[in-house]
Amino acid sequence: MTFLFPVSMKLRQANAFIEKNHRHRGRVQAHLFSLGVADHRQDNLIVGVAVVGKPVARGIDPEFTVEITRLCVDGTANAASFLLARAADAAFAIGYIRLITYTLPDEPGTSLRAASFEDDGIGKSGKWDSRPGRKRGDCIPKRRWYRFAPWFLRALDKGKF
């Protein structure tokens, strides 16, 4: 029996949780949707959030791809993989084909693998100070993870795309 269940969230609610619990990143500026995970064993307390938005990298087609821009949990067992799987379900249900996210190179990606994401390798870091007045951002290379919609993979297998 599972004790975790998904909860719809406003970005303001997700950001409040992120500011309190995330190890190295702050609030998110925009989103397509946000999800929370609550634990029935803890009086339905929110134990994690995922924020999904358009891809940050300019070279990724936003028509077919969305990105988990922030995932934050309080350490509750299985909460991260639960949120990743539910975020994928929601993105694919509204018509997106691919869901991506990034981790720091030293993070193992255990929850991502548990939620059927695949490792796409470490990418090159972009430069975030290319325009006057722009603050230099986090420019270290990150590992990209992806997951395709199951219906899209079945169509590929049948030669429909």
Image (cartoon, rainbow, N blue to C red):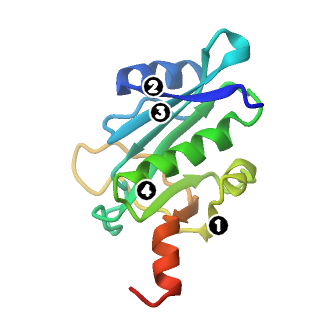
Type of amino acid at the residue the image marks with label 3: Leu
Q: Mark 3 points at which residue?
A: 35
Nearer-N-terminus badge (1/2): 2
Where does residue 55 sit, x and y in percent of width and height? 37, 56
Q: Name the residue under label 2.
A: 14
Left or right of residue 91: residue 32: left
Q: In the rendering, which numbered label is found on residue 69? A: none
Q: How far apart are marks 3 and 2 (CA)?
A: 8 Å
Neighbor class of circle 4 (other Cα within 10 Å; few <14, some 14-19, many 20+) is many
Nearer-N-terminus badge (1/3): 3
Q: Nearer the viewer, mark 1 or mark 3?
A: 3
Q: Name the residue under label 1.
A: 119
Nearer-N-terminus badge (3/2): 2
Q: Distance between the residues labelled 1 and 2?
A: 26 Å
Query: Which sits in the foreground, 20 or 39?
Result: 39
Neighbor class of circle 1 (other Cα within 10 Å; few <14, some 14-19, many 20+) is some
